[in-house]
Image (cartoon, grey):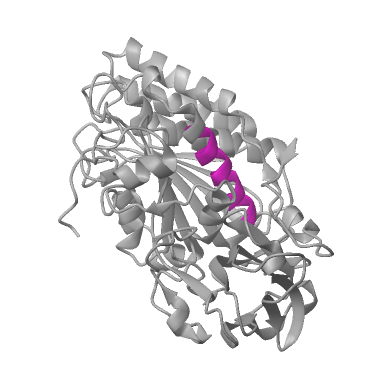
Amino acid sequence: MAGTLLALVLGFGTLPAAATPSGTSPASTTAALAAPDISVTAVRAHLDELSAIAARNGGNRRSTTQGYRDSVAYVKGRLQAAGYTVTEQPCTSGCTSGAGPNLIAEWPRGDANNVYMFGAHLDGVSAGPGMNDNGSGSAALLENALTLARENPDMRNRVRFAWWTDEEQGLNGSYFYVRTLSSAERARIKAYYNFDMVASLNGGYFINHITSAAAAPMKAYWDSLGLRPEENTEGAGRSDDYSFERYSIPTSGYAMGASARKTSTQAAKWGGTSGSAYDPCYHRACDTLTNINTTGLDRAADGIAYTLWQQAVGTGGGGGTCDPAGVVGNGGFESGTAPWTGTTAVIAAHSGRTAHGGTRFAWLGGNGSTSTESVSQTVTVPADCTRASLVFWLQIETAESGSRAYDTFTVRVNGSTLATWSNVHAGGGWIQRSADLSAYAGQTVTVAFTATEDYSLQTGFLLDDVSLQSS
C-alpha cells in the first residue's frame, strides 16, 4: 500500500448454512453461497516464489527493478498456461522512470459489456521483499484466477484481473490504466475490487466502502464467518481502487491494515494486540514470509472467490441478469434510515448493544408492553435468479420463559408471511436467518420485518445486515 494519501485527486465449498427456525429450509441460501474453496497452501506457494524472486534481486521487488520484472514474468507465465489472455501494459506516462508494466489478464468468457475487475499491486518498496505489502494481495488474486480457470464454470459476466506497477510511488500504474481507457471501456467496468495487505499479522478485517452495493458480496462472506468487518478508513485513497474512484467506477476490496494501531475494541473482537500496528513490518525489511497471517490470508482469498462467483459466474452467453448485490438498500443500517420506512426510530447505534456489523442496527420490540414495530422497503428481485433468499442477522433477547410464543418477529412480502421467530428462539447472539424469495423473481415487492409484543415481559428483536442472495 502506498504510504501517503494522494493529493490528486478470485472441490466447491460453501459458507456456513444459515440458521433457521423449524420448518424453514436454508437450502436456497446454502446453494447461493457456493464458491470454490481457495487453497491457502497454494496461495502461500505463490508467496514463496515472490520471496525467492526478491532474494535473487537485491531483497526487494520495487517497480523499477529486476525483482519486479521477474514477478511479472512469474504471474504472467502461470496465467498464460491456464488459458488467460494476458497483456503487459507499459506505463508510458506518469510512472517512475524505469517502472515495469501493468499485467492485465482477462478470462475469455461471459458478457464483455459487463466487466468485474479484481486487482492488486505487484510492486513493493525498496526496504524489503514486500510479502504482506503486497505479495499477499497479489498471491491471493493469482490463485483465484487459476482456480477460475480450473473450474471453468459458465460465465454470466466478464472477469478481468490486474497486477499494478508503481503503486508504492503514487498509484501510478493503475491510474495510467484507467485514464487511458476510452469512456466506453470505462463504462463496461461495473465494479473494481482491490486487495492490498490481506495478511497483516496484527490485522483487522476491513472493507472499502463497506455499505456500497459493490461491497455487498464481500461483506456477506466475512459476515458469514462472524468477523464483523469495518470500513477501511486507513486505506482510503491510498491504494489502486482510488484510481478507479476518480472516474466514478464503483469500488470495494479487502484489507487487514498497515501502520495504524489496533484499538482495544478491535482486539476484543478480532484478537491481537491493542495499541500495536496492524502490520508491525509495514514498509520495512521484516516484511518477509514470517510476516504473514495465514488465517487472514485464507479468509481474504475465499472472500475474493465468493465475490467473483456472485458477480460473474452463472448462466453463460451473457444472457443472465441475476445480480443481487445492492438490491437491498442500506442493509446494514449504517447510512441513516432511508430507504427503510415504518418505525424508523428503531434504527440507531443503540447504547449497551453491539451491532452485528458496523455500529448501527434496528432494534424492534423490547418494550415489555403491547406494541407493534416494523421496518420495510421496496425491492426488485432480479428476474433470472432461480433461487433468491432474503438473508439477515437476528439477535433475540427476552424476559419471557417457557415454550410458548408470546412475542413474534415476522418476515412478510407484500403482506404474506414468509417466516416467523419468537421469544422461544431467544439466545445464541447474532444468528444468520433467511427467507425464500424465489417465487418473487422479476417482481417489485415490499419486504417488511415486524415485531409484535404482548402486554408484558419484553422481547427484543435486533436486526442487522440484510441482503438478497442468490444462486
At x 49%, y 73%, the residue is 362
Which residue ends up furthest to the right in the rendered image?
23
Give the extent of the magenta segment.
Answer: 297-310
Q: Quadrant of residue 100?
A: top left
At x 73%, y 47%, the residue is 153
Which residue ends up furthest to the left in the rendered image?
7
Where is residue 434? Give x, y as percent: 70, 64
Q: Quadrant of residue 192?
A: bottom left
Where is residue 343? Give x, y as percent: 50, 86
Residue 256 shows up from this direction: no
At x 43%, y 36%, the residue is 137
Q: Is residue 432 above or below residue 343?
A: above
The foreground one among 367 and 215 is 367
Q: Is residue 177 left or right of residue 389?
A: left
User: Is residue 308 magenta-colored?
Assistant: yes
Q: Is residue 338 above or below residue 304?
A: below
Where is residue 395? Give x, y as percent: 58, 62
Where is residue 414? Give x, y as percent: 71, 88
Considering the image in quadrants, where does the C terminus appear? bottom right
